[in-house]
Image (cartoon, coloured by chain):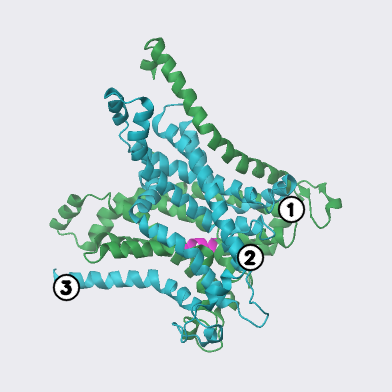
Chain colours: A green, B cyan
Amino acid sequence: MTGRATGGRAAGRGARDERRLGWWLCAPAGLVMLLVTGWPVLYSVLLSLQRYDLRFPDRKAWIGLANYGTVLTDAFWWNAVAVTAVVTVVSVAIELVLGMAIALVMYRTLVARGLVRAAVLIPYGIVTVAAAYGWKYAWTPGTGWLAGFLPAGSAPLTERWPALGIIIVAEVWKTTPFMSLLLMAGLALVPEDTLKAAAMDGASAWQRFRLVVLPLMAPTIFAALLFRTLDAVRIFDDIYVLTNGAQSTSSVSIIAYHNLVSGLNLGIGSTMSVLVFLGVAVVPVVFVKVLGASAPGQDRGR
Amino acid sequence: MGGNSRARWALLDLLVLVYALVPVAWIASLSFKEPSTVSAGTFWPTRWTWSNYTGIFQNDDFVRGLVNSIGIGLISTAIAIALGTMAAYAVARLRFPGRNAVLGVSLLISMFPQISLVTPLFEIERRLGLFDTWPGLVLPYVTFALPLTIYTLSTFFREIPWDLEKAATMDGATPFQAFRLVIVPLALPGVVTTAILAFILCWNDFLFSISLTSSNAARTAPATISFFTGSSQFEDPTGSIAAAAVVITIPIVVFVLVFQRRIVSGLTSGAVKG
C-alpha cells in the first residue's frame, strides 16, 4: 500500500478508484442486510421495553425492563431454554460422530463411491418440514412403520422424553449430511504421504485417525461444530411439525413464535427475540474459550 | 485386502444408503397409499394409488402455495445473486478498507437467529403494508441468501484466472468482449451453483412463511402443507401431506443430484477454506 501511495499520481488515483469501486459494489448488499436485520433488531429492543399487546392496543406504555422480569421468571421460558440446549448439544454431538463416520466412508470407500456421495445429498435436499412429517407419521401408532416396533399402546410423540428423542432423530438425519460434507472436505486436506509414513511406522488405523487425521482436521471440525451449533439453536421446523411444543418440548424459537402468533403479545415476543439474539451471540465466544482453538481462517488463506 | 476389504466397504456403503434412503422411501410410499389403508402400518402400500397426487393438485391452496414458493424463491434468488455478485467481485478482486467487514457482517447474518427478526418484522411489515405480500417474504429471504451468495461467490471468484482478461485485450479484444467471452464463461458455473444454493435456502424456509403471511396470497408451499386438513373432517390428511411433501422435495433433490459435484464444493468452500 505505501509503495502504491507514493508511486506517483496515476497509481494513487488507481488505488482511490479501486477503493471507491469496492465500496459502491458492496453498498447495495450491505444496505439490504443492515436494513432488514439492523432495523428490526433495534426495533425489537424498543418494543421489548413497552407493554404492547395487539389485543389491548390502548394499554401500550413504556414499562422499562418489566418484560425482561416477566420472561426471566417464567418457568415455560426456562424450560424452552433447557430443551433448546439439550436438543442442540445431543444432536450436534451425534452429528459429529455420525458425520465423521459417513465422511470416512464417502472418502475412502472402494466400491460405488459416486452412488454413496449422491445418496448422502438427498437428506440435505429434502425440505425440513417434509422430512419432519415423514418422521411424525413413522412414529404415529397404527400408521407408522417405526411405531410398529414399539410395544402396543405406546405413542412416543405424546410423551416428553420420547418426543424429544424423535425431534433429535429428525434433526440429526437431516443435517448430518452437511456435517459429513464439511468433514470430507477436511479429510481431503490430510496429506496421503503423512498417513503412509505413519502406517510404515506401525501406527494402527485407529492411531492414524486419532494422532494424524484428527489434529490436522481440527480447524475444519471447529468450523463445522460452530456452524451446526448456531444452526441447531434455531430449531423450529422439526418441533413445530412433530409436537408443536406440546408436552414441554418447546424450543426458544417455538415459544417466541407462539407468543407472537397466538398471544399477539409484541412486548413479550420482542423481549424473547432480544434474549435469543443475546444467547446466540454468546455461543461463538464460548466456543473459542472452551475449545481454545483459533478461529479457522485466521491463520490460513492470508 | 482385495475381495475382503471390498466386501467390507460394500457393507458400509449399504449402511449409508439405508440411512439416507429409507426415510425418503417411507414418505414416498405413504404418498401412494390409499387413504383407507394408511392405518395398516405397513412400510409399502398394500394398494397403490395416484389419488393423493391428483387430490393435492385440485387443492387451490396448495397450487397457489407452489406458485408462491416458485415466484418468491426465483425473485429472491435473482436479487440476491445480482447484489451478491457485485459484492463478491469487490471482495475477491479489489483492495479497499471494509473488505473484511463485509465478510464479517455476512457471517454474522448467516448465523442470525431468524426468530429474533420475526416479531419486529411482523410489526414493521404490518405498518408498511408488506404483511402477507410477496415483497414481505422476498425481503427476509434476500437478506438471508445474501451472506451465502457473497461467501460462496467470492470463493469461486478468487479461483478465476483473471489474467486471461488482460491477455484477451492484448490480443485485440475490447474490454467488453474480454469480459463477455472470457470472464463470463469462467464465472458462470460458480454463479449457477450459488443461485441453486440460494434458491434451496428460500424454498426450505418455514418460519418466515408461517409468521409473515395470513392467507394464500403469499404463503409458500411448506407452510401450506402444515394447514392441510382432510377434504372432510372424517378424512385423514396423511396421504395428501405425504404427496405434497414429495412434490416440494422432488425439484430440490433433482437440482442437488444434477449439480452434485458443484454443490458440494459450493457448500464446503466457505467453511474449509476460511
Residue B222 location (% of width, % of height)? 57, 63
Subunit under mark 3: B
Residue A174's image quarter? bottom left
Circle 2 crowding by C-alpha within 10 Å: few under 14, some 14–19, many from 20: many
**In this rendering, is residue A221 above or below B21?**
above
Label 3 and label 1: CA atoms lie apart by 64 Å
Query: Closer to the camera: disc 2 or disc 3?
Result: 2
In the image, what residue type sits under mark 2?
A: Asp
From the image, tell me which residue sits under label 3: B4
Residue B260's image quarter? bottom left
Q: Secondary structure at mark 3?
A: helix
Task: Specify the segment rendered in magenta.
Answer: A85-91
- Magenta stretch contains residue A90: yes
User: Which circle's residue, 2 or 3, is located before the other in the chain?
Assistant: 3
Q: Is residue B32 left or right of residue A180?
A: right
Residue A218 location (% of width, % of height)? 34, 50
In contact (CB < 8 Å): disc 3 and disc 1: no
**In this rendering, is residue A250 above or below B136?**
below
From the image, tell me which residue sits under label 2: B61
Q: Is residue A29 left or right of residue B129?
A: left
From the image, tell me which residue sits under label 1: A266
Q: What residue do we see at 51% from left, 38% from top?
A: B83
Q: Is residue A208 left or right of residue B259?
A: left
